[in-house]
């Protein structure tokens, strides 16, 4: 079995913690999950575009878990590294230096999940 890399570990560990949170706050977690599914569902914008936006916001908000989960979603949706990189450029514009650091992390996360 291959060894998990950083963002695989981040999402796996956080996934377990989210299961515990679901037990403590079942209605909140259920409603959040419903909101998530509704927000990223294809509409005028396709799911990949919405996930690219979510990745940019994750970087600007400096949310490591969000970066991991949205990078994973983008890898599953067939995003290209060029699409992710261009999205991260907009995140850097909006978030400055800290977003530059998180962009490096987001690209690493995408590459990690895209290699699975």
Image: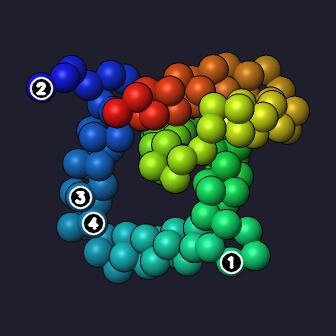
Q: Whole-Å distance between the Cαs marked 2 and 4?
A: 29 Å
Q: Which residue is mark 2?
A: 1
Viewer can see residue 28 = no
Q: Whole-Å distance between the Cαs marked 2 and 3?
A: 24 Å
Instruction: Indicate whether 63 appears above or below 21.
Output: above
Of marks 4 and 1, the one in the foreground: 1
Say which residue appears at 45% left-offset and 34% top-offset.
114
Tell me if mark 3 has few (under 14), some (14-19) or many (20+) residues whose alpha carbon lies within 10 angstroms of its own: few
Instruction: Indicate whether 9 appears above or below 30.
Output: above
Q: Whole-Å distance between the Cαs marked 1 and 2?
A: 38 Å
Q: Which residue is mark 3?
A: 19
Is 30 on the left or on the right of 44, as rendered? left
Residue 108 in percent (x, y) is at 53, 23
Q: State the mark number for residue 43.
A: 1
Residue 80 in percent (x, y) is at 62, 38
Instruction: Indicate whether 100 appears above or below 46.
Output: above
């Amino acid at each position: 079995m291959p060894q998990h890399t950083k963002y695989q570990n981040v999402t796996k560990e956080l996934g377990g913690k989210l299961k515990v949170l679901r037990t403590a706050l079942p209605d909140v977690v259920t409603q959040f999950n419903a909101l998530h599914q509704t927000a990223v569902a294809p509409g005028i914008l396709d799911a990949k575009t919405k996930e690219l936006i979510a990745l940019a916001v994750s970087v600007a908000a400096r949310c490591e878990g969000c970066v991991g989960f949205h990078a994973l979603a983008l890898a599953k949706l067939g995003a290209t590294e060029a699409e992710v990189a261009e999205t991260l450029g907009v995140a850097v514009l909006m978030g400055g230096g800290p977003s530059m650091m998180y962009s490096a992390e987001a690209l690493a996360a995408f590459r990690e999940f895209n290699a699975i």
